[in-house]
Image (cartoon, coloured by chain):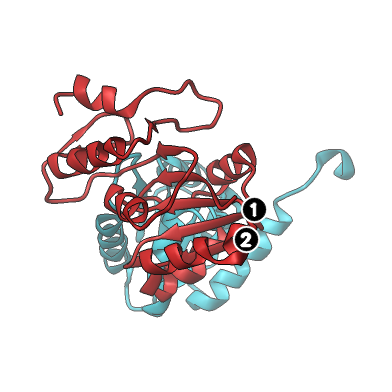
Amino acid sequence: MAVVHMRIDNRLIHGQVTVTWVQAVGANHMVVCNDKVAVDPIQKLMLPQAARGVKTSVLSIADTLAYCESPQGQAERIMVLAKFPSDGLALLEGGLQPQEINVGNQAPIGGTKFKMVTNSVAVTAEDAAVYSAIAARGHALTYKMMPSDRSGDFLQLLAQKGF
Amino acid sequence: MVGIVITSHGTLAEGLRAAAQMILGQQEAVQTVGLGPAEDLDEFLTKLRQAAAEVNRGSGVLVLADLFGGSPCNTAAYLVQEGMEVVTGANLPMLLEALSQREERNPKELAEAVIAAAREGTRRLADVL
């Protein structure tokens, strides 16, 4: 058992929300995955502080894949926080097999042509193609803020919003 | 006078400023920066830097962030690298202390004073009565 849950969320760790998810999916290690964040010394220091005692690592895509495949990673129940859908897809292409994938927050990036598909998820045409590629690999994508929220199919939502 | 920036999720920062001004009256060199539900964090950092520059009257800046580990706090962490003081757990006792002590103290002393004020301001009333 390695990766029990993947959350696509460009806010990464937000204290209470994240801890609720970690408990709900029964994870014992949170891995924040993004190549830029992994080399940002401030974020590497600050992000684990928000995790309220849950073991947290901040890793690049390559290091996330290597860790999840290692005996140590295989012995854990890992929740991966992918910053962008492209990080999530890269991990899947690298062989990661999460049991579940959920789209959390995607705050819009200034200067991009985005559409808000929920209150907290912005999607560009490029993002929509990445989400479709994730779904095409056989993964269902949900979009829940909290684990107890009703689950919806993210691809259906994208279709409804004209993507 | 040390400039004050309050940063929070949503409108808490603005609410804290409004509450403090209800008690102390109109205050200068206080800016608020609230994080919207769908806001880009790079833009948020730019807003924080602008707010800090606006309130700095030459004696430095104290930033009060609402939640240790939250996005406003993690973004304000870059300001610490730029020499500013940031204290987390922003609340009304802290802000009142900051506003009333900022003529006499430097930002570091003010940071220590507001943390003490927050501790003193948190009580179980049944223990006091």
For residue A36, what is the image quadrant? bottom left
Q: Nearer the viewer, mark 2 or mark 1?
A: 1
Q: Amino acid at mark 1?
A: Asn
On screen, B124 above or below A37? above
Label 2 with label 1: CB-CB less than 8 Å: yes
Output the letter for the chain in red: A
| Element carrying mark 1 | loop
Mark closest to the chain's N terminus, 2 or 1: 1
Identify which residue is drawn at 36% across, 55% down.
Answer: A91
Q: Chain of mark 1?
A: A
| Element carrying mark 2 | loop
Which residue corresponds to mark 1? A28
Q: Is residue B14 left or right of residue A79?
A: left
For residue A107, what is the image quadrant? top left
On screen, A120 above or below B102? above
**Quadrant where the image shows the N terminus of chain B:** bottom left
In the rendered image of the structure, the colour used to display chain B is cyan
Q: Position of residue B108 (x, y in %)?
A: 53, 77
Which residue corresponds to mark 2? A55
**Quadrant where the image shows the C terminus of chain B:** top right
Identify which residue is drawn at 43% across, 44% down.
Answer: A7
On screen, A154 above or below B33? above
Q: Chain of mark 2?
A: A
